[in-house]
Amino acid sequence: MALDRMALDQVTVDPTGPAIEAMRDDRHMKCVQFRTALSARLDGEPSGLPEARLDKHVARCTGCQEWLDRAERLRGQVRSGAADGPSPEWSARLLARLDEERPGAQAPAER
């Protein structure tokens, strides 16, 4: 049975329909898996996926590209902050608090 070209041109897809939602959910699930693999790779751990497959997905998926860009920026910020270490004031407060919590230490005087 031949399809009527006119009828085929008039077919519309409901962008909120269950088939479209299922495709979105499937894509989201795949992206979650890829982002988990990307996170592992950023941490120097095995990604669990072939590197070529991971790179191919990121090249095609703008959502994962944006996620990876944000993750790399955050990683850089965390590393630069960690390289500086804690401030001298923070270290002094920590040491004072540890002294207070030491067994047998006297409670700090009320002000």
Image (spheres, helix red, strand yellow):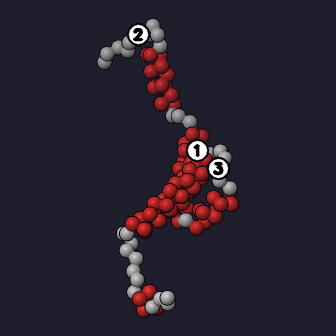
Separation of residues labelled 3 and 2 (CA atoms): 53 Å
How far across and down, in percent of the image, does residue 25 sit? 45, 60
Q: CA distance from mark 1 to mark 2?
A: 38 Å
Q: Which residue is disc 2 drawn over? A: 106
Mark 3 residue element: loop
Front of the two marks 1 and 2: 1
Rendered image: mark on residue 48: 3
Q: Earlier in the sequence, mark 3 or mark 2?
A: 3
**Label 2: which secondary element:** loop
Q: Nearer the viewer, mark 3 or mark 2?
A: 3
- What's under tag 3, amino acid-wise? Gly
First reached walking from the N terminus: tag 1 or tag 3: 3
Query: Residue sitting at 44 percent across and 16 percent down?
Result: 101
Depicted 62 relative to depicted 83: above or below: below
In which quadrant of the rendered view does residue 10 lie? bottom left
Residue placed under numbered mark 1 in the picture = 79
Is 7 rendered above or below residue 95?
A: below
**Quadrant location of the C terminus?**
top left
Number of disc labels: 3
**Is residue 105 positioned above or below 81 on the image?**
above
